[in-house]
Amino acid sequence: DATANRFRYQWVCSAISCCALLDDKADIEEVFCEHHEDILLKRRDGKYIGVQVKTRDSTQPLWSASDEIVLKSFARFTVLNLQFPDQFCEFSFSTNHPMQSRRNGQDVCFLLDSIKSHANYDEVERTGQTFIKKAEASEDDTFESLKKVTASSSFPKLRDATVRLIGALSEVWSRAGEITYTKLDEAANKLINACANAASLSVLEILPAYLSLTSNGLERSVCE
């Protein structure tokens, strides 16, 4: 049940991201679930934002730069940045849990800000270089990818994620003011289910049946 709850949390966060599609002020035109990253956002200029969603219980320690999960996440960002050059404008490590904030070698946000303030790896302070060297890729490749990384602990807590989604939906959906809270909650849950289906590729269960009912179904099936 705990594992299922965390998967659902990720779908809720994806649904919250989808609210940007209804916001004329936002720069997002498409949202992908479990495609290269937990959440992949496509901007109107064609560039992408890769988002990794990480959760921790309140009893666990603060996120720090030495956490294996943090290092693996940033290593993955580096791989994506190399695989798809010039296509990613940002990577986001997004979590529901606070981060260490002592402005030292364990402060993730402090290290990222320090890296972004320099033009190349050789100019980075020793603490930043030590952090970069922990990655599996070359120092220069890791440096270039980390310049695009942001880290945020502003994601909702595990227990109030759906409420946060309902709030976000009510702010950007033009019909929200015309319906009851119950209907708004229903709409939010349908959006969560849509993200769950997108993340699990449930469409693949329907596609074979659909193709068999169409003309030239076999040829189309081979093509698909």
Image (cartoon, rainbow, N blue to C red):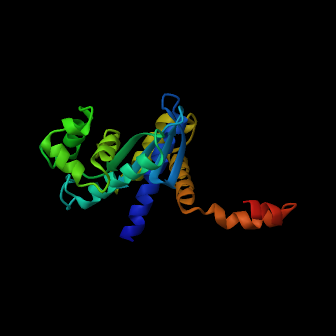
Question: What residue lies at 36% left-to-right and 49% top-to-bottom?
Answer: 78
Q: Is residue 3 left or right of residue 197?
A: left
The count of marks equals 0
In the drawing, does residue 214 fall left or right of residue 89? right
Residue located at (17% from left, 49% from top)? 130
207 over 105 or under it: above or below: below
Percent of width and height locating residue 65? 20, 52
For this orientation, the residue located farthest to the bottom is 1
38 versus 164 height, above or below = below
Q: Is residue 99 visible?
A: no
Q: Is residue 169 above or below residue 208?
A: above
For residue 153, above or below residue 28: below
Residue nearer the viewer, 222 or 134: 134
Can residue 114 be seen at all in this image of the molecule? yes
Picture residue at 29% right of the left edge, 43% below the top: 143
Q: For this rendering, which residue is in front, 62 or 1?
A: 62
Quarter residue 158 falls in? bottom left
Say which of 136 and 185 sits in front. Answer: 136
User: Residue 174 at x, y = what percent?
Assistant: 56, 33
* Residue positioned 70% across, 64% down in the render: 206
The quarter of the picture where the N terminus appears is: bottom left
In what quadrant of the picture does the C terminus appear? Answer: bottom right
The image quarter in which residue 113 lies: top left
Q: Where does residue 2 sit, x and y in percent of width and height? A: 36, 69
Q: Residue furthest right?
A: 215
Please give left or right for residue 102 compared with residue 137 in the image. Answer: left
